[in-house]
Amino acid sequence: MAAKIADVSVRVERLSGPLLTLSNDAECCRFSAWRCANLTARDCSGLARVATVGDSWLDRCTSLTALDCTGLARLAKVGDSWLYGCTSLATLDCTRLTQLVTVGDSWLDGCAALTTLNCSGLTRLVIVGHRWLATCTRLTALDCTGLTQLAAVGDHWLYGCTR
């Protein structure tokens, strides 16, 4: 099944729930861009109005190597499994996510290729669920200087990260 998500053609292996036109909505549905195995890059510039993203957004997009978060300036809340199992994602710059307050479980869990994460812009982040950055076995650079408001991180943060 082929689908077009914000001007990126992808092969969708499984999609549960309605597919929304992400560039026109203030909230993205659950399971949008879930298991998009052929998605290699995601430009979020068309998501300027999005403040909330449901569960499994960009979950198991195993070919995803790049994510441009520039357009996510209003993003305040993300559900479970955001960027879970994106095994090809090597770096992520979160400096533009200045409004992000809450992230659910399994954020960046299983991103085996992730080497660098910049969290310096996450100055409003208060809560992160379980398994944040778990099994990111290649992670060598993590900038947490912006996490001044972080009050709660669930179990297994950095679990299995041996470097």
Image (cartoon, helix red, strand yellow):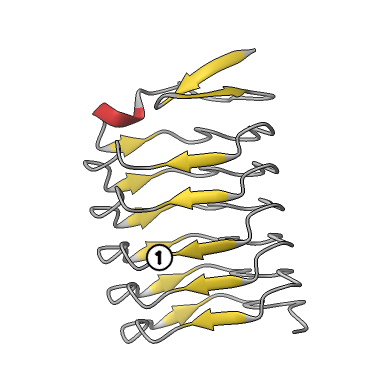
Q: Where 157 sits versus 13, above or below?
A: below
Q: Residue sitting at 70 percent across and 69 percent down?
A: 136
- Relative side of 128 to 126, left or right: right
Instruction: Name the residue that disc number 1 marks.
Output: 94
Q: Relative to residue 108, is residue 102 drawn left or right?
A: left
**Res 108 quadrant in image:** bottom right
- For the point 50% across and 78% down, which residue is it? 153
Where residue 162 sits: x, y (%)? 78, 83
Answer left or right for 82 relative to 93.
right
- Identified by mark 1, the residue type is Cys
Q: Quadrant of residue 90?
A: bottom right
Say which quadrant the N terminus sits in.
top right
Q: Which of 103 and 24 is in front in this view?
A: 24
Q: Locate the C terminus and report the quarter of the image it occupies.
A: bottom right
Image vertical order of residue 61 relative to residue 74, above or below: above
> Closest to the observer: 92 or 157?
92
State the residue lying farthest toward the top: 1
- From the viewer's perspective, is residue 47 above or below residue 81? above
Residue 128 position in % (x across, y down): 47, 70
Q: Position of residue 74 (x, y in %)?
A: 23, 53
Q: Badge 1, how many Cα within 10 Å: few under 14, some, many 20+?
A: many
Q: Which element type, helix, strand or loop, lies under badge 1?
A: loop
Q: Identify the residue at horizontal 31%, vertical 38% (top origin).
A: 27
Q: Is 122 left, or right, of 117 in this rendering? A: left
Whole-percent x and y of residue 77?
A: 35, 55
Q: How many dots with numbers?
A: 1
Q: Which residue is drawn at 65% across and 71% down?
A: 115
Q: Is residue 146 or residue 159 the one in the foreground?
A: 146
* In the depicted structure, whether residue 94 falls above or below residue 45: below
